[in-house]
Image (spheres, coloured by chain):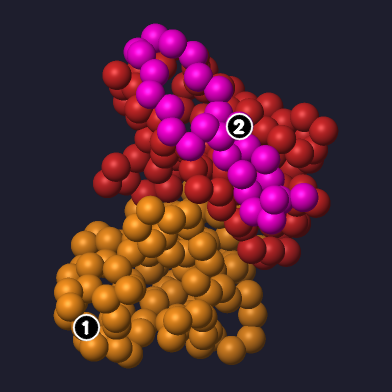
Amino acid sequence: AQSVSQHNHHVILSEAASLELGCNYSYGGTVNLFWYVQYPGQHLQLLLKYFSGDPLVKGIKGFEAEFIKSKFSFNLRKPSVQWSDTAEYFCAVNERGADGLTFGKGTHLIIQP
Amino acid sequence: GAGVSQSPSNKVTEKGKDVELRCDPISGHTALYWYRQSLGQGLEFLIYFQGNSAPDKSGLPSDRFSAERTGGSVSTLTIQRTQQEDSAVYLCASSFDPSSGNTIYFGEGSWLTVV
């Protein structure tokens, strides 16, 4: 069965620090990759997604992620975080041609002002 | 409405009682999902509907859990004889054809507390 691993369960950073959240998946076939974000008290929303083409994907609010097929990774990055980035971040993977998403356990990001 | 709508937003129930959680997906979305999010845990897949049929029920944690979808739209998740470990946020999501990688949109969730 496919699995998604997010290695950092809790991350605390200061404002303006750079961010990288790791995500690895187990499936060896063709995949669609997603990062979802859940701000405090709000519902899950899409941050960015990769289907094909340029492996460096840019999303909302200055976030980007790079798909490295050889490493089965889709790490999320932001050069300079803001206090408003405090949220729970979930990586998710969909097998191309299959249904549903498999989610990682999430990373709770806290940005200190 | 424009988004996925779930009700109730909050539910406190006594252990052993049955609960029903409702999801109204985005109009036109054929795929509907139920996930569970427990404190400190990730998102746990429960069940997936394509139209009215449920090709994947593999995530339902026990036979106390069931779900149905009628008219290819509204879905109800039913938990019978609730237990304290059922306390979680139950999230519903919907999308167009998921195999094409269409974005899945989530509702705000139904917070269930079993006391």
- Identify which residue is drawn at 58% across, 60% down: A94
Count of marks, rendered view:
2
Which residue is tagged 1? Answer: A15
Chain given the colour orange: A
Identify which residue, B93 or B7, lies in the foreground.
B7
Is A91 left, or right, of A79 in this rendering?
Answer: right
Q: Is residue B11 magenta?
A: yes
Rendered position, A88 above or below A51 = above
Residue range in magenta is B1-27
- Identify which residue is drawn at 50% across, 71% down: A47
Is B89 left, or right, of B67 in this rendering?
Answer: left
Mark linked to residue A63: none
Mark 1 — on which chain does it sit?
A: A
Identify which residue, B115 or A12, lies in the foreground.
B115
- Identify which residue is drawn at 35% across, 27% down: B113
Q: Position of residue B20 (x, y in %)?
A: 55, 23
Rendered position, B111 above or below A37 = above
Chain given the colour red: B
Quarter of the picture containing the C terminus of chain A is bottom left
